[in-house]
C-alpha cells in the first residue's frame, strides 16, 4: 500500500532493510537460545519470519527478499554454518516466491499467506536435503514438516497481522 | 476477524491438511517388517547388516574425522553416538520397520531398513 505513494530512495531502502534485517537477526538469536525442544528434527516456530512478512506487506517484495537474504547470510556466518545457510536459503527462496505470488492474488489474508510460506519453507529445505543426501526416502519427513509448517506459519501470520495493524 | 482469516485461507488449510493426511496414510501403508539394515555414507553404500544380528558399527563420515555409531540390537536400529552438532540422528530413537530411516545430514549418513517378505509383515499381517 505505502510504496505506491511513497517511493523510497536507495538510502531509505538500505536503511529500512538494514534495520529490519537486524531485528530479524535478533529474533533468530532469541529463538536459538530459548530452550524448547519439540523432539522432532527440523521443527521450529521461525519468529524471524514475522519481520519478513511485515517487510513484504508494509514495503514490498524487494524489501522482503533483501531482509531474508541478509538475515540468513549473517545468521549462517554467526551460528548456523554454511550447511545451515544453504538450507535456509533454499527454504526462503521457495517460501518468498510463494508469498509474493499468493499476495498478488489478493484472496488470502496475512495468515493464509504466512501458512503457505511455512509449508513451502519446509518443502524447500526438504528438497535440498534430498538432493544432498541423494535419497528420496527423506520424504518420510514430509507429513511432519507439512503440519509443523502449517502451525508455525499460522502463528507467524497472526503475529504479523497484529503488528501490521499497529504499524498502519 | 476478517483481516485475520478469509475463506481462501480455510480452503488452503483444508487442502494442505488433506495432502498431509494422504501422504501419511500412504507412508504408513508402505511400512512393513524388514530384515536388512542398509548404511549409506555420503550417498554411497557403506555396509549392510541383518536386522536380527546385534552389531555396533562405527561409520566414518566423508568429511574428515567425523563419525556416527550405529547400533543394531534386538531387531531395532538406532544411532547411539554422533559427532555432528545437532544430534538429530541420536534423538531420532529406534527404527525397526521396513522403509524407516535415520538420517544424519551433517555427516551425510543414512541408515535404513529394507526387505521383508512380500506377504505378511507389518500392518498386513495384522489384518490377514
Image: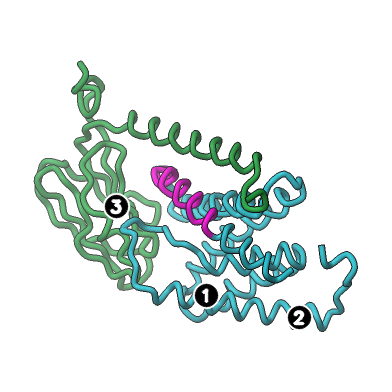
Chain colours: A cyan, B green
Chain hosting mark 3: B
Which disc is residue A27 wearing?
1
Q: Is-magenta flag for residue A149?
A: yes
Within 10 Å of disc 2 (Cα), the crowding (few <14, some 14-19, many 20+) is some
Query: Callout 2: helix, strand or loop?
Result: helix
Answer yes or no: are tags 3 and 1 on the same subunit.
Answer: no
| Along the viewing direction, whichever of B79 and B124 lies nearer the viewer | B124
| Along the viewing direction, whichever of A6 and B16 lies nearer the viewer | A6
The residue sitting at 76% across, 45% down in the picture is: A105
| Along the viewing direction, whichever of A52 and A165 lies nearer the viewer | A165
Q: What is the magenta segment's predominant secondary structure?
A: helix
Foreground mark, 2 or 1, reads 1
Q: Position of residue B19 (x, y in %)?
A: 50, 35
Q: Earlier in the sequence, mark 2 or mark 1?
A: 2
Residue A138 appears in the figure: no
Spatial CA span between label 2 and label 3: 50 Å
The reply, left or right, for residue A53 in relation to residue B109 is right
Within 10 Å of disc 3 (Cα), the crowding (few <14, some 14-19, many 20+) is some
Residue under pointer 3: B46
Query: Callout 1: helix, strand or loop?
Result: helix
Foreground mark, 3 or 1, reads 1
Dividing the picture into quadrants, the one containing residue B41 is: bottom left
Query: Callout 3: helix, strand or loop?
Result: strand
Chain hosting mark 2: A
The image shows residue B34, relative to residue B77, as above or below, that is above
Magenta stretch bounds: A136-155
Answer yes or no: are tags 2 and 3 on the same subunit.
Answer: no
**CB atoms of marks 2 and 1 within 8 Å:** no
Spatial CA span between label 2 and label 1: 20 Å
Foreground mark, 2 or 3, reads 2
Which disc is residue A14 wearing?
2
Amino acid at each position: 500500500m505505502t510504496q505506491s505513494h511513497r517511493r523510497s530512495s536507495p538510502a531509505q531502502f538500505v536503511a529500512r532493510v538494514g534495520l529490519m534485517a537486524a531485528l530479524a537477526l535478533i529474533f533468530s538469536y532469541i529463538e536459538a537460545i530459548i530452550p524448547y525442544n519439540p523432539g522432532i528434527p527440523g521443527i521450529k516456530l521461525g519468529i524471524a519470519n514475522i519481520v519478513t512478512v511485515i517487510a513484504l506487506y508494509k514495503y514490498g517484495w524487494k524489501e522482503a527478499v533483501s531482509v531474508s537474504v541478509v538475515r540468513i547470510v549473517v545468521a549462517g556466518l554467526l551460528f548456523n554454518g554454511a550447511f545451515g545457510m544453504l538450507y535456509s536459503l533454499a527454504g526462503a527462496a521457495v517460501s518468498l516466491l510463494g508469498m509474493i505470488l499468493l499476495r498478488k492474488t489478493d484472496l488470502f489474508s496475512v495468515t493464509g499467506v504466512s501458512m503457505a510460506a511455512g509449508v513451502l519453507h519446509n518443502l524447500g529445505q526438504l528438497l535440498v536435503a534430498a538432493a544432498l543426501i541423494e535419497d528420496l526416502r527423506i520424504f518420510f519427513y514430509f507429513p511432519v514438516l507439512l503440519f509443523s509448517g502449517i502451525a508455525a506459519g499460522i502463528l507467524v501470520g497472526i503475529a504479523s497481522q497484529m503488528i501490521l495493524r499497529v504499524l498502519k | 476477524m476478517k483481516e485475520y482469516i478469509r475463506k481462501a485461507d480455510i480452503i488452503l488449510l483444508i487442502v494442505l491438511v488433506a495432502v498431509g493426511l494422504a501422504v501419511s496414510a500412504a507412508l504408513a501403508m508402505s511400512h512393513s517388517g524388514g530384515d536388512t539394515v542398509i548404511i549409506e555414507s555420503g550417498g554411497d553404500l557403506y555396509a549392510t547388516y541383518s536386522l536380527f544380528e546385534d552389531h555396533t558399527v562405527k561409520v566414518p563420515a566423508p568429511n574428515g574425522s567425523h563419525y556416527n555409531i550405529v547400533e543394531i540390537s534386538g531387531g531395532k536400529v538406532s544411532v547411539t553416538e554422533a559427532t555432528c552438532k545437532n544430534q538429530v540422528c541420536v534423538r531420532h530413537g529406534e527404527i525397526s520397520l521396513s522403509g524407516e530411516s535415520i538420517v544424519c545430514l551433517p555427516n551425510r549418513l543414512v541408515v535404513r531398513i529394507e526387505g521383508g517378505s512380500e506377504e505378511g509383515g507389518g500392518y498386513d499381517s495384522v489384518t490377514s
